[in-house]
Image (cartoon, rainbow, N blue to C red):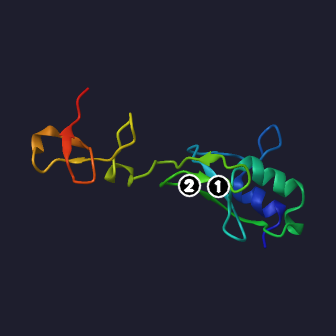
Amino acid sequence: MPNVADIERLAGERTTDGKLPTFTAVGAYPLIYITHCAEVLCADCATEQLDSGNDTNFDPIEAVDVHWEGEDETCGDCNRAIPSAYGNPWADDNPTCSVCGGELEQSEQYPDAGLVHRVDSNDTHKPITN
């Protein structure tokens, strides 16, 4: 199991306020801290856990990684969202309406209409109007 010095070495130097870094020093990529039970922690919660004795914790931090892409990770302690460096590459597969959150898809009946809004479960669609 890595000790505090190992985690700090992997993550980089602590910030001026004594916390583990939230981002890499080069490129500013978001860091996630991973515990033995595969729980993700944000930098603030990882700092708190290391400072309170990582070696005596039942679920110690064992790794630090860059959250390259995908949906936001959620800190297992404070529920803070940790965004990925390059976003979610699958997000555009199921676009949703910014107003109501409904599903959008390409119309087969009206291909020139662009994305259309799902109205009901009978696959009835109407073009999106602004």
Q: Residues within 10 Å of mark 1 (few under 14, many from 20)?
A: many
Q: Which quadrant, please, contains the N terminus?
A: bottom right
Numbered tag placed on residue 32 in the rendering: 1
Give the residue type at disc 2. His
Q: Amino acid at mark 1?
A: Ile
The secondary structure type at the circle numbered 2 is loop
> Could you say whether the residue bearing mark 1 is in a helix, strand or loop?
strand
Picture coordinates of residue 114, whole percent (x, y):
18, 40
Between 124 and 115, the residue placed more toward the observer is: 124
- Whether the residues at callouts 2 and 1 have beta carbons within 8 Å, the answer is yes
In this figure, which residue is indicated by the disc labeled 2? 67
Residue 64, given in percent of the width and then of the height, sits at 67, 60
Q: At 55% across and 47% down in the image, what residue appears? A: 83
Which residue lies at the image location 82% right of the left edge and 56% below the top edge? Answer: 49
Is residue 110 toward the left or the right of residue 86 in the image? left
Q: Viewed as shown, does residue 80 lie left or right of 71?
A: right
Location of residue 30 in the rendering, given as x and y in whole percent from the top left corner: 59, 48
